[in-house]
Each structure stands twice: as C-alpha cells, then as structure tokens.
C-alpha cells in the first residue's frame, strides 16, 4: 500500500536567475484555469484544474499549450488515483509505455512505475525504484522512439532533499556559441541505456536495449524550436568523430548546459503533478543524496513520442 500523501510545508521552487530568450507571460486562460510561469520562460504552474475530475477540452488545450511553451508544467494540490494519473498523462499524448523495470510497476497498471525508497516492513523488499534517475538524462533517449513527455505525481515527499533539477535544453541551444553550433550541425549521436555504469546493471535489474541514434540537435516537431538532445548518461558518442574528440565536444556542451542559468531546482510537495517535454529539457533526480530516514514516493508515467527530427 502506498501511504496517503503527507502534506509537506509549501516551498516555492528556486527561481532561475537569468533572463529568458523567449518569455511567455501568463498564457491561455480557460474559465478559472490559468498558467503562471514558475521561472521566466522555463516551467509554469497551472492553476484551477482538478485532475481527479474529467478535464474539459478547453483546459486540456491550456495544459498542452503550456507544456509546449514552458517545457515543464506543475499542477499543485492534486489527490489522484492511478486512473486519474493515466488520464492526465494522456493530455500530453495518447500512448503511454511501461518502464523496463517490471518489478516496480504499480499493482493496478504497468503504465505507472513507482519511484520510492520505501521497503516492505515485513519482507524488507523494495517498494519502488529508489534511485532510478539521479543522473542527467532525457527519458528514453536510449530507444529509437524516445519519450515525448514524462509525468510524476508526488504521493509522499521528504521535508528536505529529493528535489528534481531540470535543464532548459532549448535555451541552452539558443545561447550556444556559433562555433559549437557549427560543430554539431547535422550530426547524430549514439545513445545507450547502459552507457553510464550504475548499480542497477550489476544487480541484474535492467535489460539494456541495443544502441540507437538521434540528432544532436532536435527540432521540436510542434514548436519548431531547436534543442540540444545529448545527455551525459545515455549519449555514448557523436558520430563521425574520434572517441576523444567526441568526448571533448560532449564535455564542452554539457558544461555550457549545466550553468545555473539554465537550471530549475524543483522542490516537491505531496500532491504535485509535474510533467516535462523530453524534446526540450533534460533532468536529474537528487535521490542519491536523500536521507534514507526520509521517504519519497512518486508515480511516474511515460508518454511515447514519435520519430525524432
Ligand atoms: C526521472 O528521472 O524520470 C525521475 C526523476 C525524479 O525521481 O525526480
């Protein structure tokens, strides 16, 4: 059984300091629903939608538009059953996919994976994937058809620690030097789930899919904006370059992306629903640093994407 949400004390996500390239102010409003930027140009809070109830077409449109414009969306104060989480995820795309780790699928549906550091009090068995994303990545970039969106619903959160950090790969691309833009223009890169050696591989929990390839710069199929689409955890090599040259180029690009001005540190509250656009951002959990005496349980869905461009 997943514990009922503990209402954590409200903490506002730390704002990004730098100026945006494109700042969208408060955007589409439908009835009492509105979207307010969390940090200028990256991340928005959608207010006035109860995801445990049927969501009107107009509100679905607002949520989707906000997702495209702001790349990370947050709806606070939700109290959701698994079906509500699936319905909410389908606002972002019709097809959801199950995670590779079957042992942590929600008992009601394989389309939700449980991220949790809780253990069964009797057997000691892990109740969820405890540290599945504490490394910079785009979700599912290790498959030819990567994730379009990811949604997390916070069931319980610690009073400190366990934040998720997002990186705005659209703005990072926009502000990349012309020299680096030229060096990656038209290039592709190889991605592999097992590139970054992690505990899960030695424990035999994960099957590693074969290598796949994606453009280093993706043009978003809906917004038309370009974003960097390599990440430190799954991107093995930029094709057409010697390994050392590829490593050095990746390193330069990651140093650029991981400047504080492109990051948003997200502090969770129980009842938060957060979703992000994987074509336009990368992220990392910080669960590797979480005090084991503090509990964090989130439900996660993946919205499948289309072919990358
Ligand atoms: C993920 O990488 O999808 C999960 C992020 C988190 O647990 O904060």
Image (cartoon, rainbow, N blue to C red):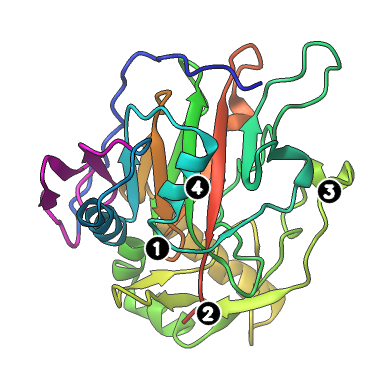
The residue where tag 4 is placed is 86
Specify which label sits upstream in the sequence, 4 or 2: 4
Q: On the rendered image, what quadrant is the N terminus found in?
A: top right
Specify which label sits upstream in the sequence, 1 or 2: 1
The residue where tag 1 is placed is 280
Q: Estimate the x, y position of residue 240 in percent, counting from the top left.
A: 64, 87
The part of the chain drawn in magenta is 21-50
Q: Which of 111 and 166 is in front in this view?
A: 111
Q: In the rendering, which numbered label is found on residue 52?
A: none
Q: Nearer the viewer, residue 62 or 209?
A: 62
Point out the frontmost of discs 1 and 2.
2
The residue where tag 3 is placed is 201
Q: In the rendered structure, does residue 129 fall within the stretch colored magenta?
A: no
Q: Which of 308 and 262 is in front in this view?
A: 308
Q: Distance between the residues labelled 1 and 4?
A: 22 Å
Q: Estimate the x, y position of residue 164 in percent, counting from the top left.
A: 47, 37
281 vs 100, left or right, is left
Point out the frontmost of discs 3 and 4.
4
Point out the frontmost of discs 1 and 4.
4
Residue 38 at least partly seen: no
Within 10 angstroms of label 2, few (less than 14), some, or many (20 or more) residues?
few
Some atom of ligand 1 lies within 8 Å of the CB belonging to the residue at label 1? no
Does dot 1 land on a helix, a strand or a loop?
loop
Specify which label sits upstream in the sequence, 3 or 2: 3
Specify which label sits upstream in the sequence, 3 or 4: 4
- In contact (CB < 8 Å): disc 3 and disc 4: no
The residue where tag 2 is placed is 307
Within 10 angstroms of label 1, few (less than 14), some, or many (20 or more) residues?
many
Q: In which quarter of the image is residue 14?
A: top left
């Amino acid at each position: 059984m997943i514990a009922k949400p503990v209402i954590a004390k409200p903490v506002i996500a730390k704002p990004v300091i730098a100026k945006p390239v494109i700042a969208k102010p408060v955007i589409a409003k439908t009835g009492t629903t509105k979207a307010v930027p969390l940090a200028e140009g990256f991340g928005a809070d959608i207010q006035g939608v109860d995801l445990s109830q049927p969501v009107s077409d107009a509100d679905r449109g607002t949520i989707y538009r906000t997702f495209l414009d702001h790349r990370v969306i947050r709806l606070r104060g939700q109290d959701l059953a698994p079906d509500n989480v699936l319905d909410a995820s389908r606002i972002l795309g019709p097809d959801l996919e199950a995670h590779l780790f079957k042992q942590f699928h929600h008992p009601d549906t394989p389309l939700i994976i449980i991220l949790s550091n809780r253990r069964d009090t009797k057997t000691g068995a892990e109740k969820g994937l405890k540290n599945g994303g504490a490394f910079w990545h785009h979700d599912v970039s290790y498959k030819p058809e990567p994730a379009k969106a990811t949604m997390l619903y916070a069931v319980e959160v610690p009073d400190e620690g366990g934040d998720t950090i997002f990186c705005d790969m659209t703005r990072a691309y926009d502000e990349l030097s012309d020299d680096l833009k030229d060096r990656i223009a038209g290039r592709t890169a190889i991605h592999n789930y097992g590139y970054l050696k992690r505990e899960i591989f030695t424990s035999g929990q994960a099957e590693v899919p074969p290598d796949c390839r994606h453009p280093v710069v993706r043009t978003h199929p809906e917004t038309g904006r370009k974003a960097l689409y390599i990440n430190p955890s799954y991107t093995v090599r930029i094709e057409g370059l010697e390994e050392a040259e590829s490593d050095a180029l990746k390193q330069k690009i990651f140093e650029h992306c991981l400047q504080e001005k492109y990051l948003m540190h997200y502090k969770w509250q129980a009842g938060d629903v957060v979703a992000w656009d994987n074509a336009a951002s990368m992220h990392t959990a910080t669960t590797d640093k979480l005090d084991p005496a503090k509990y964090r349980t989130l439900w996660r869905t993946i919205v499948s994407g289309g072919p990358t461009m």
